[in-house]
């Protein structure tokens, strides 16, 4: 579990800052998309897009790492 967390954090670390922030707020702080939008003064649709793109990049990054192992 610890190794998995390190890998996920590493992949998150290469995301663009806005996607990184959205992912961290949603998945590590448990905030809803609406709460993220309010906290960051960002339209809800933009928050949804950032989360969607960020999750896809995380998935692709973890898949790449798995393929390398």
Image (spheres, grey):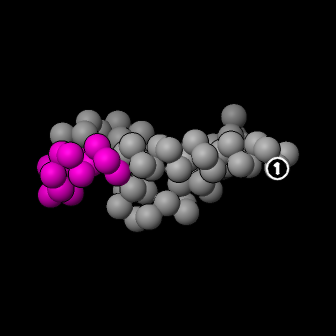
| Residue 63 visible to an observer of this rendering | yes
**Magenta-colored span:** 35-50
Compared across the picture, whether 20 is left or right of 67 comes to left
Residue 39 makes an appearance in the image:
no
The residue lying furthest to the right in this view is 69
Residue 48 occupies quadrant:
top left
Assess disc 1: are there few (<14), some (14-19) or many (≥20) residues with their C-alpha within 10 Å of its C-alpha. few
Q: Which residue is mark 1?
A: 68
Give the tally of numbered discs.
Answer: 1
Residue 34 picture location, percent across and down: 18, 40
Residue at the spot x=31%, y=47% of the render? Answer: 49
Residue in view at x 79 percent, y 44 percent? 67
Residue closest to the eye, 49 or 22: 49
The residue at 62%/56% (across/down) is 10
| 26 relative to 37 in the view: left or right | right
Q: Is residue 27 left or right of residue 60?
A: left
Say whether residue 46 is magenta.
yes
> Relative to 1, does residue 56 appear above or below in the rendering?
below
**Residue 21 locus on image (x, y percent):** 37, 56
Q: Could you tell me which quadrant the C terminus lies in?
A: top right
In the image: residue 51, left or right of residue 32: right
Q: What's the magenta bit mostly, secondary-structure-wise?
A: helix
Q: Quadrant of the N terminus?
A: top right
Give the quadrant of residue 40.
Answer: bottom left
x then y, percent, for residue 18: 35, 61
Query: Was residue 32 drawn as part of the magenta stretch in this picture?
Result: no
* Residue 35 location (% of width, % of height): 20, 42
Q: Is residue 25 above or below residue 17?
A: above
């Amino acid at each position: 579990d610890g190794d998995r967390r390190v890998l996920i954090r590493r992949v998150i670390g290469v995301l663009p800052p806005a996607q990184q922030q959205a992912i961290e707020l949603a998945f590590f702080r448990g905030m809803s998309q609406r709460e993220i939008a309010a906290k960051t003064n960002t339209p809800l649709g933009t928050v949804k897009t950032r989360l969607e793109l960020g999750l896809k990049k995380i998935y692709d990054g973890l898949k790449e790492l798995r393929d390398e192992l």
